[in-house]
Amino acid sequence: MCLPFNSHHATDNTGAEGALESSYLSDAGLIALSVGFPNLEKLSLIWCSNISSQGLTSLAEKCRFLKSLDLQGCYVGDQGVAAVGEFCKQLEDVNLRFCEGLTDTGLVELAHGCGKSLKTFGITACAKITDVSLEAVGMHCKYLESLSLDSEIIHNKGVLSVAQGCPLLKVLKLQCTNVTDEALVAVGSLCPSLELLALYSFQEFTDKGLRAIGVGCKKLKNLTLSDCYFLSDIGLDAVAAGCKGLTHLEVNGCHNIGSLGLESIGKSCHQLTELALLYCQKIVNSGLLGIGQSCKFLQALHLVDCSRIGDEAICGIAKGCRNLKKLHIRRCYEIGDAGIVAIGENCKFLTDLSLRFCDRVGDEGLIAIGKGCSLLQLNVSGCHRIGDAGLVAIARGCPQLSYLDVSVLENLGDMAMAELGEGCPLLKDIVLSHCHQITDAGLMHLMKRCTMLESCQMVYCPGITAAGVATVVSSCPSVKKILVEKWKVSERTKRRAGSVISYLCVDL
């Protein structure tokens, strides 16, 4: 049985849902819940800030079969967490993110009490948690498989203890500015089962640590490197050489990693299915060409602010990675129609395309996509060269389209809206903001068949008036969200919409 209590909704064991503000759940409510559901196995109390150790202690005493507990944002103290350790001997998964009231005392007791069953452990922004807690985890939690740690006061000593005491570790996510290569070397030598490693904002982490991972963690499948400024191609080359089963790679803001490291990944990691390159200024076309030549199973590619990657690389991906399903590109100004045409001609399984602020992409690229792919989601926000012709091709070629963002397309007009209304009846979410040529007439045509629409954003569209807003409300019984200037919502429209729609009003 699972009971989530958070700021969005609560669900009981019958599946019924109802609104419940997290701040309303107090110790009294938690005590009542524990009395009523003694066999509870999973409980989420995200941001239930009124819960204290009193309520948590009662829960622990009565719900001894608890296996998963999420206390994110709860100001619980050591007493409550220690009680969980004492009574909940089957606990496998615990999340303590943003539990500011905790100290090492509570965490040590939790690790001692639940150590034999605990498999997943998350600690973030707990300012009073030190290496002492991680030493207890390493000592008592020998079956731990997943650790997520975000702390500015954890040092090598704590991570070393986990590496030494938790040989079955499969997932390790670290954002610890004071952890250095010494800890990563230990992980590489002592945690051979590691499958996922995510390293964020490492100021003192170098290729030495990444080499140790490549040598010792042969089962690694998922690697994220974010803002690791001292990493270079040497470290990535070591991962490629040792972790040939790698399927997911994200490189974000690692300014010293260039094309050579990515070429090594392409040569060795042929099972790669997802690649994300964000703010990688040193990576040029040759890096992605290597991926295109060898990684035929690639299904998702994300590129953000990679200023030296252009059409040549995208053409290489298109020809070599024909199983591509998701392509997200943002602010890559060297990528234009030639690359997107190649995608349309070769990647027949593509369903999710995002080309935000790629100002060299125009109608030619979208026409090829419309002819070759059956998209479910499309975002071309800020691609100012795209007009009606490109969106008409999408409307005629992608009848399953459910999400569309065409914001900031100043040349897009009512013709495209009419075609979308005819060709894309499954459309649920559309973003039209800052489209100056779209008018009420275009909206009327769009809504003729797009009656399943749930969300419509149309801020700063001067051609859309109160009449257009009323058209959306009257035509779409499932609509839940409209983003529009306040003065465009008439009193009659407000009354007709009732409480079903949550208006997000923007004043001029």
Image (tube, helix red, strand yellow):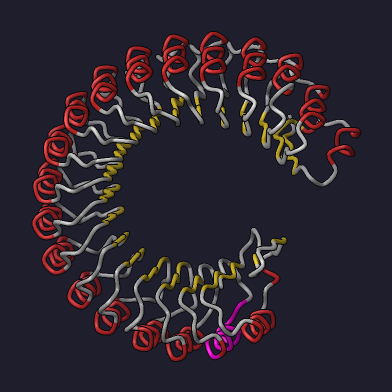
Principal SS element in the magenta part? helix
Q: Nearer the viewer, residue 399 or 76?
A: 399
Quarter of the image for residue 117 reads bottom left
The residue range painted magenta reads 51-61
Quarter of the image with the C terminus in it = top right
Left or right? Give the position of 248 relative to 437.
left
The mark total stands at 0
Q: Residue at 70% across / 64% down in the picture? A: 20
Quarter of the image for residue 310 reads top left
- Judge whether 333 appears above or below 206 on screen: above
Q: Nearer the viewer, residue 338 or 79?
A: 338
- Judge whether 353 appears above or below 122 on screen: above
Q: Residue at 82% across / 24% down in the picture? A: 466
Quarter of the image with the N terminus in it = bottom right
Quarter of the image for residue 325 reads top left
Magenta stretch contains residue 52: yes
Q: Position of residue 314 (x, y in %)?
A: 29, 22
Magenta stretch contains residue 487: no
- Judge whether 379 appears above or below 45 on screen: above
Q: Position of residue 234 (x, y in %)?
A: 10, 44
Q: Residue at 17% across / 46% down in the picture? A: 231
Q: Residue at 67% across / 73% down in the picture? A: 25
Q: Position of residue 46 (x, y in %)?
A: 56, 66
Q: Position of residue 329 (x, y in %)?
A: 39, 28
